[in-house]
Amino acid sequence: MPTRPKPPAAMDTAVSPDHDLEDEATFRRLAFLDHDLNGQAADAAEFEQCRFTRTGLARTVLDRAMFTDCLVETSDWANLKATKSGLLRVEVSLGRLTGLHWVDGTLRDVTFRECRMDLATFRFTSFKDVAFIDCNLTRADFTNADLRGASFTGCDLSGAQFAQADCAGARFTRCELGGIGSVASLKGAVVSAHDLAGLAHTLAAALDITIDGS
C-alpha cells in the first residue's frame, strides 16, 4: 500500500500573484485553497507539504516538476501536461484529471481515489506503490509504462491502452477491462476472477478465437 503524505500541522495560504507558477520556484507548506493556476507554465517547480483544495491546474504545462507529501482534493487538473515530473507520497481524491498528460514521469506512494481520469496519458511513466481506487480511467493510455507497482480497484479501464507496458505484478480487482488495447501486455498481472468475464472477448479477439454463442 502507498505510504501516506506527511503534511505539516500548520500552513500558510497561497495568494495570487505571489504564489503563481514560475520557473524553478519552490512552494513549501502552502494551502492552495480555491486557487487558480489554470493555463500557467513552469520548469522545475517543486511543491513540498502542500495542500490543494478546489485548485485549478487545468491546461497548465509543467516540465520536471516535483510534488512531495501533498494532498489534492476536489481539484480540476484536466489537460494538465507534465513531462519528466514526479509525485512522491501524494493523495488525489475526487479530482477531475480528464486528458491529463503525465509523460516520462515517476509516481511513488501515490493514491488516486474517486477521480475522473478518462483519456489520461501515462506513457513511459513508472509506478511504484501506486493505487487507483474507484477511478474512471476509460481510454487511458499506459503505453510503455512500468506498472509493476500499480494496483487498480473498482476502476473503469474500458478501452485503456497497455501497448508495451510492463504489468508483471500489477493487480486488477473489480475493474471493467472490456476493450482494452494490447491485452497481451497484461502478462504477469494479477486479475481477480470477477474481472475475467470482461476480459474474455478481448482475449478471444487477440488470439483470433471465435466465441460460439449457440
Image (cartoon, rainbow, N blue to C red):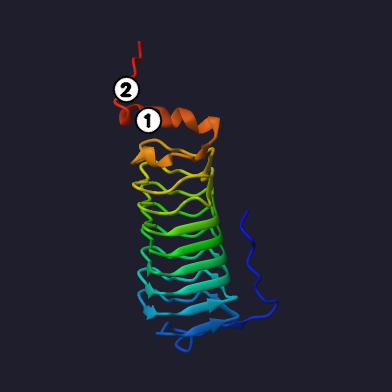
User: Left or right: 47 with respect to 210?
Assistant: right
Q: Please tell me which residue is depicted at 57% across the width and 77% down the height of the picture.
A: 48
Exactly how many numbered labels are in the figure? 2
Check the image and report above or below for 87 versus 25.
Answer: above
Classify the position of the C terminus by image quarter.
top left
Rendered location of residue 189, percent (x, y):
49, 40
Give the image quarter of residue 43: bottom left
Residue 74 image label: none
Amino acid type at image mark 2: Ile
In this view of the protein, can residue 14 be seen by the observer? Answer: no
Closer to us: 120 or 186: 186
Residue 209 image label: 2
SS state under label 2: loop
Name of the residue lying farthest toward the right: 9
Amino acid type at image mark 1: Leu
Name of the residue lying farthest toward the bottom: 18
Other-residue count near label 1 (Cα within 10 Å), few / some / many at <14 / 14–19 / ≥20: some
Image marks 2 and 1: residues in contact by CB distance under 8 Å: yes
In this view of the protein, can residue 45 be seen by the observer? Answer: yes
Check the image and report above or below for 91 versus 202.
Answer: below
Check the image and report above or below for 194 versus 112.
Answer: above
User: Left or right: 156 with respect to 181?
Assistant: right
Closer to us: 34 or 52: 52
Rendered location of residue 82, percent (x, y):
38, 68
Marks 2 and 1, how far apart in space? Answer: 8 Å
Other-residue count near label 2 (Cα within 10 Å), few / some / many at <14 / 14–19 / ≥20: few
Q: Please tell me which residue is depicted at 44% across the width and 84% down the height of the picture.
A: 20
Check the image and report above or below for 67 versus 3.
Answer: below
Name of the residue lying farthest toward the top: 214
Q: Please tell me which residue is depicted at 35% across the width and 14% down the height of the picture.
A: 213
Q: For mark 1, what is the residue?
A: 203
Q: Please tell me which residue is depicted at 36% across the width and 58% down the height of the picture.
A: 99
